[in-house]
Each structure stands twice: as C-alpha cells, then as structure tokens.
C-alpha cells in the first residue's frame, strides 16, 4: 500500500477512472459535476493515487484556497475500503499542505464518513448541507507546518 503524487497523464487517467466508478456510477453524481478545471497536471492542485498490490484503487486531491488546503475527491474503490487506504490518502494530502506551509486543511465530508475524519483529527464545523444530492459537512483540522 502506497500513495504517490500524480505526475503523469496515465496516472491521472487512473485517478479519473476511480472517481468515475465511485462518485458517478456508485453514488450518482452527474458526470458533468465530477470533473472540473482543476483536473489537470498544471499545478492548480496536487493529485494523489493510492495502490494496493500494485493496483490503483484510491485517489484524492488538494487545492489551496486563501491559505487553506482543501482536500477533495477522496475515494477508494469498494472492494478496497477496509484496508486503511483512506488514512493513507489523507496523510499524503496533509503532508503536501505541510510542505506548502499551510496550517489548516478543510474538506467537505460525506456525513457517513464523519467518524472516520474525526478519528484523524478533523472537527465538524458546519451543519449538514447538500452537494450533488449527497449530505455533507465541513470539517477542519489544524496541522503543523514545516516552514
């Protein structure tokens, strides 16, 4: 099990395939809403790909908005969800934030995952709101910086 930053188009395509399967096919997010202008290798955000036995099975990305790291598009293919891979993705994204000197990260977590994020040090910071027909909550975490 390992996570690595996506640096090549084929890795980004693998991440897109995972996101399409989880968010579009499994959860019913409209395809037009899943992909956006940040889904490139042009530096607007950093993408992570996680592997299990050399198979790409999970992904996530981080963008920086007004000095805060926003973790987004975190997902794992269904057969691989109970192997601790979500924690690996979050840790990798937080490490990128630390490298950038960012002291706070946030995410819009699906409500069913609230307990998972809380175990990783996130605190719920909003009431429930809807994104793409799925209930979410804003969650925040302070992280140490390396700068």
Image: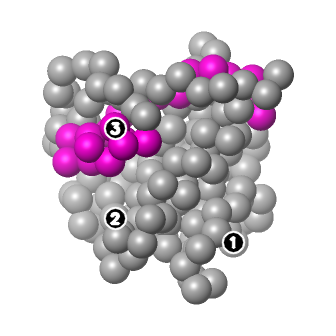
Q: Residue at x 29, y 25 (%)?
A: 124
Give the residue at mark 2.
22
Q: Quadrant of residue 52?
A: bottom right
Instruction: Give the foreground label among 3 and 2.
Output: 3
Mark 2: few, some, or many residues within 10 Å (few <14, many ≥20)?
A: many
Q: Is 20 placed left or right of 41 in the picture?
A: left
Spatial separation of the CA atoms under disc 3 and disc 2: 22 Å
Residue 127 drawn at (x, y percent):
18, 21
Quadrant of the rendering where the N terminus is positioned = bottom right
| Quarter occupied by the C terminus | top right
Q: Badge 3 is on which residue?
A: 118
Q: Earlier in the sequence, mark 3 or mark 1?
A: 1
Percent from the top left, x then y, of residue 81? 35, 69
Residue 108 numbered mark, or none = none
User: Considering the numbered disc 1 on the image, is that residue within a helix, a strand or a loop?
Assistant: helix
In the rendered image of this protein, does residue 85 appear above or below residue 1?
Answer: above
**Contact (CB < 8 A) between labels 2 and 1?**
no
- The foreground one among 82 and 22 is 82
The residue under the point 64% across, 69% down is 2
> Whole-percent x and y of residue 5?
71, 56
Q: Is residue 114 left or right of residue 56?
A: left
Please name whichever residue, 88 or 135, is drawn nearer the observer in this view of the structure.
88
Which residue is depicted at the point 43% across and 42% down? Answer: 120
Q: Is residue 113 magenta?
A: yes
What is the span of residues highlighted in magenta in the rendered image? Answer: 99-120
Q: Is residue 79 left or right of residue 42?
A: left
Q: Residue 115, position in %: x, y?
A: 26, 43
């Amino acid at each position: 099990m390992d996570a690595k930053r996506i640096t090549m188009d084929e890795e980004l395509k693998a991440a897109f395939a995972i996101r399409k399967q989880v968010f579009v096919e499994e959860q019913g997010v409209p395809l037009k809403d899943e992909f956006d202008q940040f889904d490139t290798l042009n530096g607007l955000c950093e993408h992570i790909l996680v592997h299990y036995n050399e198979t790409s099975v999970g992904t996530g990305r981080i963008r920086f908005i007004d000095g805060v790291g926003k973790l987004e598009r975190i997902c794992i293919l269904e057969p691989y969800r109970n192997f601790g891979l979500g924690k690996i993705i979050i840790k990798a994204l937080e490490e990128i934030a630390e490298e950038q000197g960012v002291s706070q990260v946030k995410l819009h977590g699906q409500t069913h995952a609230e307990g998972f994020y809380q175990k990783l040090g996130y605190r719920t910071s909003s009431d429930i709101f809807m994104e793409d027909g799925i209930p979410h909550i804003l969650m925040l975490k302070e992280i140490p910086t390396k700068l």
